[in-house]
Image (tube, rainbow, N blue to C red):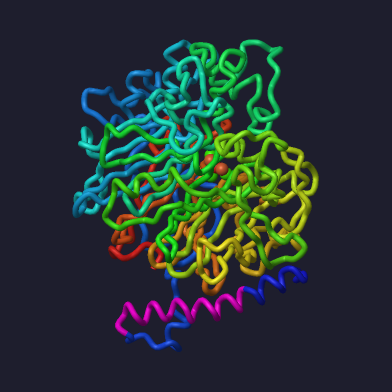
Amino acid sequence: MHIKTDFETLIESNLKRRSFIKNSVKLGLASFVLGGTTSLASSATTDLLGFEQIPANSLDTVTLPEGYSWDVVIRWGDPLFSGVENFDQNTRGTAASQELSFGDNNDGMNFFLLEKDHGLIVVNNEYANLEHIIPKKVKTKDDILKTQAAVGLSHFEVKRISGRWILQKDGMLNRRITAQTPMALSGPAKYNDHLKTAEDKQGVSVKGTWANCGQGKTPWGTYLTCEENFNGFFASSNDDVQLTKDQTRYGVKRSDWNYEWYKIDDRFDLSKEPNEPNRFGYVVEIDPLNPTDVPQKRTALGRFKHENAEVVIADNNQVVVYMGDDERGEFLYKFISKNKYVEGDREHNKKLLDDGTLYVARFDITNSEGYGEWVELTFGKNGLDESSGFNNQGDVLIFARRAGSVVGATTMDRPEWVAADPLSNDVYCALTNNKNRGKRSNAGGDSTPVGGPNPREANLYGQILRWSPMNGDHTNHKFTWDLFAMAGNPEVHQGLKAGSQNINKHNMFNSPDGLAFDSSGRLWIQTDGKYSNEGDFAGMGNNQMLCADTNTGEIKRFMVGPVACEVTGLSWSPDQTTMFVGIQHPGEKGRKSNFPDGEGKVPRSCIIAITKDDGGIIGS
Ligand code: FEO
Ligand code: CA
Ligand code: CA
Ligand code: CA
């Protein structure tokens, strides 16, 4: 039996209170849009989640509710240009073919409408899945270069033809960005000594981006790609090299994650280029409408393991960007631009992310809901000066994690995607899990006490945090917060491990990660968790996508992914009749999957398009 704890009772009463307030707010909006034809009473029962929930499963396919279909739009290795050989099941391509084909391990993405039934998809390719991209033990130089060509981003045009979105080879805006694409360092850390290398003595330009995880889209039509686990691509040819505290804080080690880039290029060798890792871990702004645009690493948004970048325009037109640092016991951040967004002035807006103030979140951790504040990370304030090892604002931004520790930021359970509700001022963040909670400090030595937004020791399942800026103003430095949901397994556990009241045996999941609102206000939740379907995770099946009504707290399972995949990345056609969803690394870690091409074929990360058979809005 599921026994309610004080904590859950609090969450439940909170949900009811929220529901009352938010229904009033949202209904106000709905009535306005619908010309006042909707009465308050009838709308209070409006069912935002109009689909039949599906059960969990462990099948090697995509499962959707009755009345929905899916179709593959693009797969790892599909050529973006003519004249490039098709994906070879045996060799899995060469560096040259990979450089002009869809990258591996697609993650965050966005759809940009170009004209009716014609769009551009910009998508991150987080990393190269070595077990599938190089199916042999010893790597040649071309193999290593192939992995450098498989990361970064893919831009490709699609057209809707007879209801299906079809890749447009040679589209004017098609582009690959890889670990070798020239990009600029911009903002306050440009010219900083910690960014200077033999190749770039001024600290102004970098080659490439990788570990591109979640994303952001600006109202001025640029794409933000977020560099996350950049550390795993560096190593040292000298085993005796001394690592600095800052390198250790960011997970940089003497050995890499088997990519061996350092064997063919000194810039990945820590014993030769100790500053090169300082040039990764940023939010990078790309103009997808210009295929020769030089991507800009926006140092003003801080350097950490960026998950995504959720952009909100505050009431006064300042730009606010919410960002998580996905590592056990790391922090939650926000950036506020100095200058204001000016609708229609693209050149002005494209400079907004170079100048502003970075903040880190501090929560009241003595209660299960309550207050929090954003603490400024500015050189000369809050103890951020020479005494704490910073000489200028560039240092504060490059070593933002250390700055967060100095000001006493709250250690979190791995902040993944942040999503702002388009119909209210609430903001949500997936705190995916944290086996170290209450057990181990973070890499900077900050303790990780159980409590507040991180209420469970050795957190197995994750939770979804929600906050509201004071007075509904995203530039306000204070906020209130609560937990929208705590994932758990009510079939296996009682108490906190059973999850919050809106989790039950029919919708349970673990490790929320991708999080995004559609324009109707549905909150979509993607998972990156354990898919063993056993023990603590029994009954949860493969990774999946759920949908929540934040008015009522209701959560329903909408999609189940194939074997050993992560479901990550989502975007919509503007009419919301197509939802693009990312299936990342099916068949990882030796699990048997042949998704999406079928029996005997190598599993391939891909983007699928989901449509409703009656042509309606997804989820309605
Ligand atoms: Fe690339 Fe934190 O996920
Ligand atoms: Ca993620
Ligand atoms: Ca994750
Ligand atoms: Ca993954």
> Does residue 177 lie above or below 156 as drawn?
above
Q: Viewer-proximal residue, 21 or 317?
A: 317
Q: Which residues are magenta?
A: 15-35
Q: Residue at x 48, y 48 (%)?
A: 356
> Does residue 191 lie above or below 528 as drawn?
above
Tally the numbered discs. Answer: 0
Tell whether 493 sits left or right of 501.
right
> Does residue 201 lie above or below 542 as drawn?
above
Q: Viewer-proximal residue, 393 or 15?
A: 393
Q: Is residue 604 magenta?
A: no
Q: Position of residue 522 (x, y in %)?
A: 45, 65
Q: Position of residue 128 (x, y in %)?
A: 48, 28
Q: Residue at x 54, y 52 (%)?
A: 334
Quadrant hosting residue 317? bottom left
Q: Residue at x 34, y 24 (%)?
A: 99
Tell whether 399 sits left or right of 560.
right
